[in-house]
Image: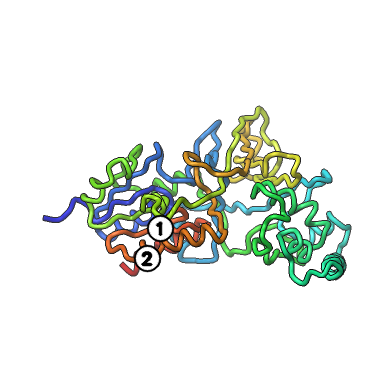
Amino acid sequence: MGKEYDYVIIGSGLFGATFAHLANKRGKRCLVIDKRSHAGGNVYCEEICGINVHKYGAHIFHTSDKDVWDFVNSIVPFNRYTNTPVAIAPDGKLYNLPFNMNTFYQMWGVTTPAQAQSKLEEQRMEALEKMRAEGISEPRNLEEQAIALIGRDIYEQLIKGYTEKQWGRSCTELPAFIIRRLPVRMVFDNNYFNDAYQGIPIGGYNKLVDGLLDGIEVKLDTDFFDNRSYWESVADKIVFTGKIDEFYEYRFGKLEYRTVRFEHEILDEPNYQGNAVVNYTSVHVPYTRVIEHKHFETFGSAVYENSHTVISREYSTEWHDGMEPFYPVNDARNHAIYKQYEELASKEQNVIFGGRLAEYKYYDMAPVIGRVLNLISNI
């Protein structure tokens, strides 16, 4: 007699929800379980004062993969949101990101690409000459690498403090490879992403997740590890999107993460900062950025139709057990540990591992969905 389900899917984030949706469309019997009280993983939004608040940090969908874009828009239409962050620097000025002609004008007053190139080259040469004078042939750390790529002015104002807050250590203690290249645009273009498609689901990410899970059995407040043998017994295969080291009971040691702490605040004003994303690059400001959520879905004068706004301050911090794991720590130690878990995972016949925790990698949303689309087509 066959088992109750073809797949039990552990985790209802984008990997799990997309897998369940596509498998269900192919006639597979799927059950999704999640230890949280809501579906959607880290893309979950909480409605506050009529505003969809990205509870686990800002999520901006962007891709050049038309199949992925068409797929998500078949579930829910996306709006025209374009990510154009600004930074408040230690000098108190506002700068456009990513580094483009607007940034260079704000930094140096240059108005043509040739002037900007000249200024950048001048600052790069100063950095390289200083290294040579000290007998250094290759950048030894992130600070030297960044200055060699972009010059001291932009490094001091826009990179140094922000990076040190993100990683919790000095730029001189961070490896150079973290910042091997810095995108520089010689055009007046503040669009953070180069992708062909970009936006936010109209009505928020819960609409996307609810659409993906429509018609699929979902059990919330259900931890796989509380009754592991049962969940493994009721399905032919497990789709696991949790922490791979936890799946293997930490036999090679625990993988490390950086995490983010959020302070959400409701403000009695319609428009706090005029932009969804404002970075604070001074090391003396404890948070890395402030997100104003209404700007993801409300544009122009419509911003003033809601007299309230919700902001979130983000604090990058060390991860400890019990905290939400966000970003893998891509150093040699963790890479070596993950490789051992990956070797075990590759031998599994009835377990599919997917997503940022199960694959121990930083994933944007579109590649997660693209991976599932490819995976399903090969099953």
Across and down, in percent, residue 159 comes to 74, 54
Residue assigned mark 2: 375
Q: Which amino acid type is shown beneath numbered disc 2?
A: Leu
Classify residue 7 by image quadrant. bottom left
> Between marks 2 and 1, how big is the CA–CA gap?
10 Å
Q: How is the image coloured?
A: rainbow
Q: Is residue 138 above or below residue 357?
A: below
Residue, far top: 268
Helix, strand or loop status at disc 1: loop
The reply, left or right, for residue 32 in relation to residue 260 is left
Q: Nearer the viewer, mark 2 or mark 1?
A: 1
Marks 2 and 1 close (CB-CB < 8 Å):
yes
Q: Which residue corresponds to the image point at 59% horizontal and 34% vertical from the top-left?
A: 264
Residue density around tag 1, few if under 14, some if 14–19, many if 20 or more, within 10 Å: many
Q: Is residue 341 above or below residue 249?
A: below
Please name whichever residue, 187 or 358, is drawn nearer the observer in this view of the structure. Answer: 358
Mark drawn on residue 354: 1
Across and down, in percent, residue 357 comes to 45, 53
The reply, left or right, for residue 272 in relation to residue 40 is right
Mark 2 or mark 1, earlier in chain:
1
Across and down, in percent, residue 95 comes to 78, 51
Whether residue 195 is visible, yes or no, is yes
Q: Which amino acid type is shown beneath numbered disc 1?
A: Gly
Q: Which residue corresponds to the image point at 63% horizontal and 60% vertical from the top-left?
A: 193
Across and down, in percent, residue 146 comes to 74, 61
